[in-house]
Amino acid sequence: MSKNQILSQILTECQHCRTITQVASNLYVSQPYVSQILQAAEKQYHVALVNRDVLPIQVTLAGIKLLKHLTQLIEDQHDLENEMALFSTKHQGKVLITFNQPMATLMAPELFKPLEAGFPDVLFEFDEQTTYLAKQSLLEGKANLFVGAALNDQNITTLPITHDERPLIIIPKSTPLYSQLRPEDDFNENLNLFENADFIGLLGQSYYQDLIELIFSDNHIDINIRLRVPNLISATLTALHSSASTATLPFILPRLQIPRDQYRLLSIPETHINAQLSISYKKDASQLTQTIAKTLQDLIAKFYTKKNKTLK
C-alpha cells in the first residue's frame, strides 16, 4: 500500500473516531504508527492535519482538503494502472476510428471482432462525430481513421467504400404529407409539398444537416425545425412517433423494425447531395494505420453486402 493510501485511510478514520488510539485499532495498526504518519505529513505540508487536543479529535480544514486531493490521486493512479495494463498487452498502442453517426452504433458489433483478430496488439477505440469534427480530428492527429462522408483535402487520403448511403426523407403516416406525396413525380415537385412542414433536425456542427436544410432553402421552401436531436437514430425515431418529417439513411430503418406501412420515403437525388462513403486518414499516417484502413474497407464492403441480402 502506498503512503498516500495509508495517509488517506488515517484521515478518513480520524473523521469518525474519538481518539488516535481508536483510529489505530480500526486500521489494525499501532497508535505510535498512526501518530508517526500524521506527524510526517504535517511536517511535509507545514500545517496541522488533525487536532488531537480535543475530544473527539477533529480533522482540520487543511486535513479535509488534503484528503480530497489524496482520494483523487489514488483514483487517478488506479485508472492509470488499468490503462497501462491494457497497453502492456496491446504494445502497438491505440487506434481511434471515428465514424459519421450512427455508423459506429450499427456497425461496431460486426467490425470489432475481425479487427481485433487481425490486429491483436492494437487497442481500438470507436467514436461518432460529424464530418466537420471528424476532419479536424484527423488533421490534428486526434483520430487515426474516419469512416463516413468522402473528404476532400490535399492532406488526406481516402479509400472509397463501394456503397452509397443515399439519404432519404421519411414522412410518417401521422403527417398530412403522407397522403399528398406522389412517388411518380420528380423530387423537386414533391419537395414543394414541404412548405411550412414540421421537421426534426440534428444538433451541433453537422455538414449533413446543413446540406439537408440547404436543399430546402435553395428551392425557397421554408420548413419548421421543431426539435434538434443528437443523431439520426434519434431523429428517425422521433419523427416516426410524431407528426414531423426528417432525413434518415437506408440502413437505419430495418434495424428499427417499424412497419413499412407507417411511413413513406422520398429519396434525395445525387444531384442534391453526394452520398459517397469512404475511409480517410492523413497522408503521412503510419503503415499500421494504412493497413487497418484497407482491412476496414473490406469489412465494410462485406457488411453492406450482407445487409443488402438480408433486406431483399
Image: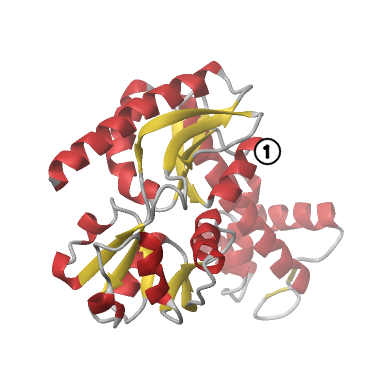
**In the image shown, does 259 or 178 lie closer to the viewer?**
178
Q: Residue at x 35, y 29 (%)?
A: 115
Q: Residue at x 54, y 48 (%)?
A: 131
**In the image shown, does 173 or 27 lie closer to the viewer?**
173
Report the side of 146 relative to 15 (left or right): left
Q: Residue at x 67, y 63 (%)?
A: 67
Q: Residue at x 21, y 42 (%)?
A: 307
SS type, badge 1: loop
**In the image shown, does 99 or 154 lie closer to the viewer?**
154
Q: Is any part of residue 21 visible from this angle?
A: no
Q: Is any part of residue 33 visible from this angle?
A: yes
Q: Is residue 190 above or below residue 39?
A: below
Residue 251 in percent (x, y) is at 28, 50
Residue 65 in percent (x, y) is at 72, 67
Query: Which residue carries the number 1 mark?
Result: 140
Quadrant where the image shows the N terminus:
top right
Report the coloring of the rendering.
secondary structure
Residue 243 in percent (x, y) is at 32, 82
Amino acid type assigned to the residue bearing label 1 in the image: Glu
Residue 194 in percent (x, y) is at 41, 75
Quadrant where the image shows the C terminus:
top left
Report the side of 278 relative to 77 (left or right): left
